[in-house]
Amino acid sequence: MAKYYITTAIPYVNAAPHLGHALEFVQTDVLARYHRIRGDDVYVVTGADENSLKNVQAAEAKGITPAELCEKNASLFKQMADKVGLSYDAFVRTSVSPEHRKGVQKMWELCAKSGDIYKKNYKGLYCVGCEAFYEEHELVNGLCPEHNKPPEVVEEENYFFRLSKYQKKLEEMLLSGQLKVIPESRINEMLHFIREGLKDFSISRSQKRARGWGIPVPNDPDQIMYVWFDALGTYLTGAGHGSDDQKFRKYWPADVHVIGKGILRFHSIYWPVMLMSAGLPTPKSIMVHGYVTVEGQKMSKSLGNIVDPFDLINRFGVDAFRYALLSDISTFEDGDFSEKSLVEKNNNELVANFGNLFNRTVVFIKNNFDGKVPAGALARADEEFLSLQKEKIERATELLDQMRLKDALSTVMEFSSNANRYFQENEPWKVVKSDKERAAAVLFVLANQVKDLAILLWPFVPNASEEMFRQLNIPRGGWEDLGKLSLASGHTLGAPKPVFSKLELKKSETGRSSSVKFESIKQPLTFADLDLEIGEIISVERHPNADKLYIEKVRLGDGERQIVSGLAHYYTPEELTGKKVIIVKNLKPAKLRGVESAGMLLAALSGDQVEVLSVNDAKPGEKATAEGMQSRPREQITIDEFQQVPLEIRGYQLYAEGRRVFAGGSPVRSARISDGKVG
């Protein structure tokens, strides 16, 4: 039996959990359940990051102690983990767990023993929201790129960690795949940061600035451990480091950390280096998800569109909630959530597809075969159908192994759709009257199809899956049972009842979903709102209705797109074909002289010169990013909104809002235009 150790990120508890936390908990649970049903020894750790300055400040603002704030909000996170169905083994509260304190102090001592911790005076720019120092060039107009607030100037004596010592080892680790970052497109962001030169970083705070809150540095009670040194150590202490050596040897290293893209640097750079210093194995992989928007807008208190996951689950049920998050939102990219989509997916997919297949199969067997799985000789068409379904099972397995949860769930939907089609085409409700043996064969096949469906759905919607197993009157099957006709003829099924129920969306007076209120505040577009992805031009044709326009087919990370561009007077088709270019992926599709264009190529412009920005070192699907800025693409933007973003060529390099833009780990450059606009 293989072990599988998986963690969520350890969230700050300065506020109540939101939809982004719920997404991460659900994604983690899908992977954990998938490995459980495959027979692995699974161990799951989550918890609450309580020893941060932002928690202290949040408590001060409420007029309560940090301990009181953490007690209240950690309880909410634990309740949410339970509510969404996260099947965790350990929930670590960093401020109250003696095992955690002992374990992270042991990690500190191991790093100190390696000679990687030293003390010095330091002055720097510190963002409390990120709990991180920033270099001046990493700020955007003097503001934190993540929180859009000015950092504090901090000067004090701290302990530092020799990050610079591990630059070459860390780069080799990422390039070799020893530490996998999923999706691969995120690796280049980290390689760029490493190649800029790793600098030693502060790993402690004075007792005064930490307000006495946190874990003391071993042998120096005047210093408190930096919150990230403390919080990242939860992955060790949750698995027994410093308290249960047998458990720790069994489960460490972690097989995967599931995190949001905003904290990738801490997990892919600081964390593995700290472990190397401590002489401990590094994690095997990091799965990175994006941010969640609500009905096309970022979640924001000022916009009044914060969605309460507890309220959604109470009103719609946990299976509909999980299914909407997993099927609507890309596993690795930013995605949008709406109650309208949740209700539509529940009614059109859970009820009308999965539920319909299961219910009518079980009901038909009850009404026509006394509730017992019938026997019958399979025809060649049945064997061909079963072979097709085995391919779907293999594909779903492959996608789950790759952590592509949305794609895997889509494949399960295809499996169910095929079985529904098989039911319709074989018309057992007619055939049973004239050829009961043939109808029996069809229902024998279908009984085993819904058994497989129950197994396939268990990682995603476990409550519904368990109800299916109850109605089939069998224990939960394992992944190895998929594709086998193991639900034997003569087996008695349980009483049938609908597995899923239809939902209705209650509307507020404004017509919006009832739990989400918006104000008519239009936020100006920034570079962070753009979704810039590398694509390869695979074909170029002339536009039938316009001499200036080309129609290009471009290969992106998730498929091909058709884009219309005004490049016909500047390039031949042969010159463009094969180029790797930057595509504005979230530009609203539009018809240009009768031909639809789904995006736009970035080009440098200066006078009569036009040059497509080519990035041959990057791969299709990788993102173009600005240094020191976190991307949070809007679902869709207009061309007028795109033109608000200050993009320019300066000294042959592409700049966005005064920051260099990178793709494939290298700056995006113009070959011919030294200074100009970008469009």
Image (tube, rainbow, N blue to C red):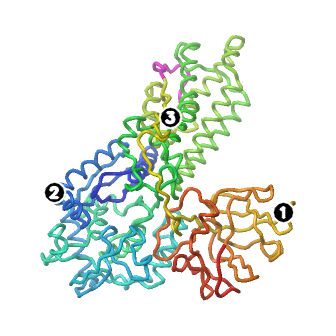
The three-letter code of the residue at mark 2 reads: Ile
Precedes in sequence: disc 1 or disc 3: 3
Left or right: residue 351 versus residue 620 is: left
| Image coordinates for residue 359, horizontal then vertical, percent | 54, 24
Q: Where is mark 2, residue-wise?
A: 64
The residue closer to the viewer here, 92 or 346, is 346
User: What type of secondary structure mainly makes up the magenta span?
Assistant: loop
Q: Quadrant of residue 467?
A: top left
The residue wearing badge 3 is 454
Residue marked by disc 1? 543
CA gap, disc 1 to disc 2? 66 Å
Residue at image location 57% in from the left, 50% down from the top: 407
Q: Is residue 287 left or right of residue 548?
A: left
Check the picture and name the quadrant holding the C terminus. Answer: bottom right
Task: Look at discs 1 and 3 and give the one toward the viewer.
Answer: 1
Which element carries disc 2, helix, strand or loop?
loop
Q: Rate crowding at label 2 as few (under 14), some (14 to 19) or many (20 or more) other CA atoms within 10 Å.
A: few
Nearer to us in this view, 510 or 368 = 510
Q: Amino acid at mark 1?
A: His
